[in-house]
Image: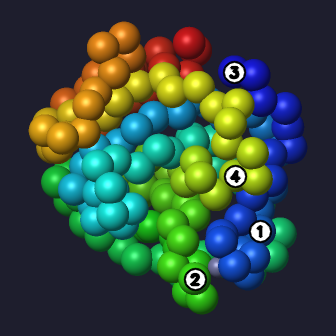
Amino acid sequence: MAVSVPLAGGCACGAIRYSCTAAPMFTWKCHCRDCQRSTGGGAAVNVVFSASAVQFTQGAPKEYVCTGTSGAKTHRGFCAECGSPVSARADLIPEIRGISAASLDDPSKLELDADIWTASAQPWDELSSTLPQFETTPTPEELQELAAH
Ligand SMILES: [Zn+2]
Ligand SMILES: [Zn+2]
């Protein structure tokens, strides 16, 4: 992926800033209903990092906790001041942390690696014809394959 580290970003109002000290493992578009509700669109574009690579350098996201279909909790981080979605972490896969693509200072160098939760993709949100698609959350093996990609 053609991004240079560290990658910095934050919310719209600047109350929250973060730094990512390693390149992303992969970037995906998640079409689950929770991502749709949190972004207001058809999908969230999440840049997935190793959890240890992401540090909040200013402020901290407020977290909304929702329970996924697996019964495990997902913590959706957003700015309490401006409402921008910033981050996400899931109890099911604690070793990774998602960063909302648009919160990066320069999201233009990102490349998408997959569409996930296509089972709940909206008919008006066109899916890529070339990217791998996963009906729900990829399995740990599939995640490893994506990361090695
Ligand atoms: Zn903010
Ligand atoms: Zn999602």
**Real-space Cα distance between discs 1 and 3?**
23 Å
The amino acid at mark 1 is Arg
In the picture of the structure, the residue carrying the numbered disc 4 is 104
Q: Is disc 3's CB within 8 Å of ligand 2?
A: no
**Residue 17 got which mark?**
1
In the picture of the structure, the residue carrying the numbered disc 2 is 82
Q: Residue furthest bottom?
A: 81
On the picture, is 90 further left or further right than 84?
Answer: left
Sequence order check, earlier mark of 3 and 2: 3
**Real-space Cα distance between discs 4 and 2?**
16 Å
In this rendering, the label closer to the viewer, 2 or 1: 2
**Real-space Cα distance between discs 1 and 4?**
10 Å
In the picture of the structure, the residue carrying the numbered disc 3 is 1
Residue 112 at x, y percent in the picture: 51, 27
Sequence order check, earlier mark of 2 and 1: 1
On the picture, is 3 further left or further right than 87?
Answer: right
In this rendering, the label closer to the viewer, 3 or 2: 2
